[in-house]
Image (tube, grey):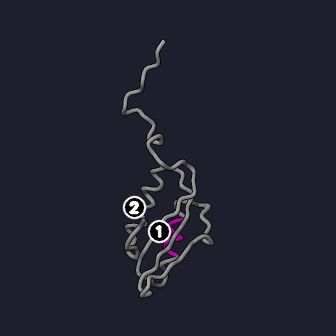
Amino acid sequence: MTLATPPADSTDPRKDSLIEYPSRFPIKVMGTKGDGFVAAITHIARQFDPGFDASTVELRDSSAGKYLGITITITATSREQLDELYRTLSSHPMVKVVL
């Protein structure tokens, strides 16, 4: 008896991912330094990870002090969650780059 190989379109997308879920996942967000920037980013992080711990946020000023890099570490539970988080962060008016 031989087992049939499932068609390519019915494969589990999690097998193609390099990320194991759930896992801690750092995201770097850069934007113009200003009032409310850190609060806005932590608010978004909590929307996607209710257990997000704001005490783990890392901040780094640019050399001229005009920009701020914020590293948030969330618990990633799916590719869809990460994709939507990246879209939400990228569309925020204070955000310049999301890595």
Give the residue number, with chain letter if any, for mark 2: 87
Q: Residue at x 36, y 33 (%)?
A: 9
* Local secondary structure at mark 1: strand
Q: Residue at x 48, y 84 (%)?
A: 35
Give the residue number, with chain letter if any, for mark 1: 28
Q: Residues within 10 Å of mark 2 (few under 14, many from 20)?
A: few
Magenta segment boundaries in residue numbering: 39-45
> Is residue 69 shown above or below 50?
below
* Local secondary structure at mark 2: helix
Query: Which residue lies most toward the top here?
Result: 1
Q: How many marks?
A: 2
Q: Amino acid at mark 1?
A: Lys
Sequence order check, earlier mark of 1 and 2: 1
**Front residue of this view, candidates 69 and 78:** 69
> Residue 15, image x and y in percent?
47, 40
Q: Quadrant of residue 11?
A: top left
> Residue 60, image x and y in percent?
50, 79
Q: Is residue 80 shown in magenta?
A: no
Q: Amino acid at mark 2?
A: Arg
